Amino acid sequence: MFKIIGIDGRQYGPVDAEQIKRWIGAGRADASTKAQAEGSEDWKSLAEFPEFAEALAAKASAPEPEAPPAGIPQPGPPVDPIALAQIITTRGVTIDVGSCLGRAWDKMMGDLWTIVGISALVWLALSASHAVYVGIVITGPLLGGLYYYYLKKIRGQTAELQDAFAGFTLTFVQLLLASVVSGALIALGLALCVIPGIYLAVAWCFALPLIIDKQMSFWDAMELSRKTINQSWWSALWLVVVCGLINLGGGLLCCVGIFFTLPLTGLAMMYAYNDVFGAIPAKSA
């Protein structure tokens, strides 16, 4: 068993050697990553451990991927949901509703009309899709793309209109399946006893961003979201309720306010997501 220090400076583990080899293969650990073997007080680079020599050599000899076409949104590398769940479970989950809303307000005010305009375009497309009975097909990809756009804004990356529709090019099928399956199960839970439906709606609130941000399958994303939210379910519920009330207030303002409250609450939800999942860089353990 080993403990390692990720690129974010945090300590993870203990995990077995096979898990570290998987992280090496995924590009989330390399020869310089510091590790401590169980029973030892010394921290050494992975290159100093003979058990990782083969995995490091295989990664080093792997061909570099071709550069992606310019102007097309690109996803990050796939994430091991079991490893990610272990990391998050170890460090705990905290959702600060006030902080998420405060940062969302600051971010929106920093680029108000661009964020409001792109958000309005997506929501209008979503409304139109339901009017012509194709909403079940494109709701997941539309919302996933909008979350992807918000995450890029939050992380200080270049975010453009095409990013808001990246759900159709990056993970269309998985976003579609997540939307349909979670929607059906939530509806069933509400019909049976209400409470199960409420629980699932909150528990799966991070499923779509996990799919498009971490390149996960729909069921892995739903399960990881649920297991993570379970550690701070009441805080997540409070965030969902507050965001819902803000949007209700926006809708009552001649329906115009909703164009400002929807991006505000969407950004707040993604700040909460980023606090839980985004602090784990793609190349860290």
Image (cartoon, rainbow, N blue to C red):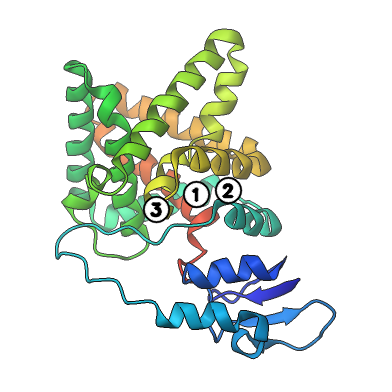
Q: Which mark is residue 95?
A: 2
Graded by Cα atoms within 10 Å as few (under 14), some (14 to 19) or many (20 or more), the crowding at tag 2 reads many
Pointer 2 or 1: first along the chain: 2
Q: What amino acid is at disc 2?
A: Ile
Q: Residue at x 60, y 41 (%)?
A: 229
The answer to whether one can see residue 160 in this image is: yes
Q: Residue at x 18, y 58 (%)?
A: 72
Q: Residue at x 59, y 84 (%)?
A: 53
Residue behind mark 3: 213
Q: What amino acid is at disc 3?
A: Asp
The quarter of the picture where the N terminus appears is bottom right
Q: What amino acid is at disc 1?
A: Ala
Q: Secondary structure at mark 3?
A: helix
Pointer 3 or 2: first along the chain: 2
Pointer 3 or 1: first along the chain: 3
Above or below, 192 relative to 11: above
Residue behind mark 1: 272
Which dot, 3 or 2, sits closer to the camera? 3
- Is the residue under label 1 in contact with that under label 2 (CB below 8 Å)? yes
The answer to whether one can see residue 262 in this image is: no
